[in-house]
Image (cartoon, rainbow, N blue to C red):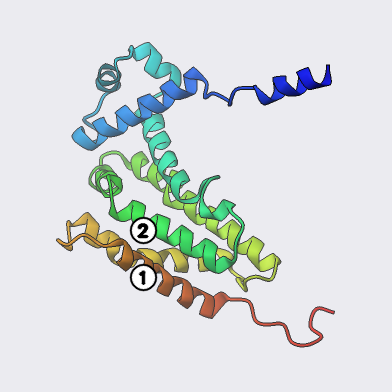
Amino acid sequence: MTQRRKTSVEAKPARRVPRGDRRRTELAVVAEGVFLERGFTETTMQMIASRAGASKETLYRHFANKEALFSEIVSRRAALISGPESALARDGTPERVLFDLGLGLLRVMTRGDACSLFSIVVAEAPRAPELGAIFYSQGPGTTLNRLTAYLRSATTRRELRCRQPARAAKLFLGAVVANYHLLSLIGQPAARITDSDMRSHVRSAVAMFLARYGALPLRRGAGE
């Protein structure tokens, strides 16, 4: 009896992603492609539904409007940088965590469609101001808040000295982004930024951050 029960547990299949969640992801991926191709204001829910091979009813069942779709897209990108599977959720020294976070951020911002998405927001925010608010709150704002929470926690553990963690988070993210993001947005430099360049840059940003906010070595008898 006992052996049979154990075998049953061992044979239990891996958890599957519900079909509704898979379809939601598929719709968001298709919508991102349409947004990048046509821009936000020129894209309609009908276009997205047609491209996805879905009915408008199905699309609206998952997303109330274009803004909700765009929010989902930006939120998914932010999760790659600072979400549950990111460096901020893993154990490690502040030096390791900040390096992994910074490198992930720089890779996302200088490669792929991230800059194209940002360009859409910059170009269309005057006509659709809600777009800028969605992009910031679900993207850069979310990463900033998550890093702030990490720095506050690391300070409580005496791994760092960030009396103003929100300011420290802004300074670190700014040091990592530097002028790379601007160059990517305007299509410069012509040569691709190598992974080695990124690693060297992020290591310098982390070193500079720790020089200001790193924990001081305990003096003999301190904390006793």
Say left or right for 109 vs 102.
left
Q: Which residue is mark 1?
A: 201
**Where, by quadrant of the figure, is residue 198 drawn?**
bottom left
Q: Quadrant of residue 148?
A: bottom right
Residue 69 location, x and y as percent?
38, 30
- Identify the residue shown where x is 46% and y is 77%: 208
Amino acid, disc 1 = His
Q: Is 9 rendered above or below residue 147?
A: above
Q: Three-letter amino acid code at disc 2?
A: Leu
In the rendering, at what x and y percent does residue 118 appear? 29, 48
Q: CA distance from mark 1 to mark 2?
A: 10 Å
Q: Is residue 146 visible?
A: yes
Q: Residue at the far front: name it.
A: 3
Which image quarter holds the N terminus? Answer: top right
Is 9 displayed left or right of 132 in the figure?
right
- Residue occupying the point 70% across, 66% down: 157
Q: Position of residue 27 (x, y in %)?
A: 36, 24
* Figure check: 159 above or below 68: below
What x and y, as percent, mark residue 28? Answer: 37, 29
The residue shown at (49%, 74%) is 209
Q: Which one is nearer the viewer's eye here, 84 or 1? A: 1
| Category of crowding for the residue at label 2, using alpha-carbon neighbours closer than 10 angstroms: few (below 14), some (14–19), many (at least 20) | many
Identify the image quadrant of the C terminus.
Answer: bottom right
Label 1: element kind:
helix
Q: What number is the disc on residue 104?
A: none
Q: Residue furthest bottom?
A: 220
- Find disc 2 in the rendering and name its residue: 106
Q: Is residue 51 above or below residue 192?
A: above
